[in-house]
Image (cartoon, rainbow, N blue to C red):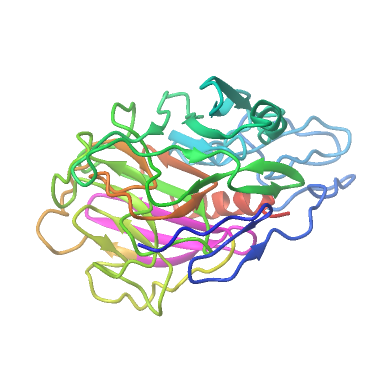
Amino acid sequence: MATDAAIATGGITSTGGTTATDGAVSNGGARPTGGASAAGGQVGSGGTIGSGGMSGTGGTSASGGATTVTGPCDIYASGNTPCVAAHSTVRALAGAYSGNLYQVKRASDSTTKDIAVLTPGGFANAATQDTFCSGTTCTISIIYDQSGKGNHLTSAPAGGAKNSTDNEANATALKLTASGHAVYAVHIPAGVGYRNDKTVGIAVGDAPESLYMVTSGNYYNGGCCFDYGNAETNNRDDGAGTMEAVYFGNSTGWGKGTGTGPWVMADLENGLFAGKDFGPTATNTPLTSTYVTAMVTGRSGTFAIKGGNSQSGTLTTMYDGARPTMTGYNPMKKQGAIILGIGGDNSNSAQGNFFEGCITSGASSTATDDAVQANIVAAGYGR
């Protein structure tokens, strides 16, 4: 287990990496007159086209028209793979979402405060947190599900690997800017973890799903296991194929990619897979950018791993092929709990940063995955 590193405001301190700064803060992008706006360019479902232009991914508006904000869940819905879980302390993940993103708990008197979005489809109202937590410390007590399914995350209960409840994240440990907005993400050192064992709509058995998270290539370790996704409902290791979560880190205890990591892998229980087996997967290369998109898609008989820089560019397919040939992975036996920052049996020696993530019903297409990545880039992480 690596020693936890302090996180400086505006940057992310790495374990085995360099300290990155968020960079210059932009005003969210210019709004052109008479043309399309914002990277990605996709009109959100239910969006309005303004005279003179179309609203682009990321929520800018055309001159003379109404604002159309598109989020990852809008894109997944348009691809017939709707979100059944959507979590972020940074921003709304659907254009129409106007509710709470997360809840903080104050150490001085144990009272709580919900932190909502500034505008529908927008960023967190972090000033509310700053006021509420002034003069004391706060933890993140709930990460609300934005999908409408009620799949909220709270501190993980005891499990087979750690027989006590996990800690809540320090609410002010990871401050950043996104499209010029000061916001907070979830900083997860070893010992911190979130879970929901009684979910609605999450894939079970061999049902297909897609999962992604935005994490960091500058803060990670080789501990088990910095996961976001589908896990056992009893907090124990129930054997091969009972999990399907996206993992990020440089663990080499099971599978691995090239170099020294960190890598996007799939945690399928009793193994982290960079490809079809535990041998090094030549196409799974390290991702070391300050913000990383990590994605896993599970289908009947096959699965895919993708990753990319959340600030620019497109996704790279690290693996797309058959399920592992070892016994237990085909068909899968997913159980449908949701975990963040831990393994399925409450293993919690991993560390990482979490900015946003979604889980879908059904396996998303390549076009949908690419549009989600464009939306994440347009969100302006670190700018």
The rendered magenta stretch, by its main secondary structure, is classed as strand
Percent x, y of residue 270: 18, 56
Can you say whether 73 is above or below 32 in the image?
A: above
> In x, y percent, where is residue 287?
49, 68
The residue positioned 60% from the left and 41% from the top of the image is: 172
> Could you tell me if residue 379 is visible in this image?
no
The picture quadrant where one finds residue 309 is bottom right
Viewer-proximal residue among 362 and 174: 174
Which residues fall within the magenta stretch? Answer: 291-319
* Residue displayed at 51% across by 59% down: 5
Q: Which residue is pictured at 81% across the width and 50% down the height?
A: 29
Q: Report the quarter where the N terminus lies.
A: bottom left
Q: How many marks on residues? A: 0
Can the viewer see residue 154 in this picture? yes
Observer-nearest of 31 and 88: 88
Q: Quadrant of residue 34?
A: top right
- The residue depicted at 60 percent of the width and 48 percent of the height is 174
Residue 67 is situated, as x and y percent measured from the top left of the image, at: 77, 32
Q: Nearer the viewer, residue 274 or 222?
A: 222
Q: Residue furthest left?
A: 327
The image quadrant where one finds the C terminus is bottom right
Residue 363 belongs to the span the image colors magenta: no
| Left or right of residue 284, residue 159 in this image | left
Based on the picture, tell me whether residue 318 belongs to the magenta stretch.
Answer: yes
Tell me residue 207's x, y (percent): 26, 41
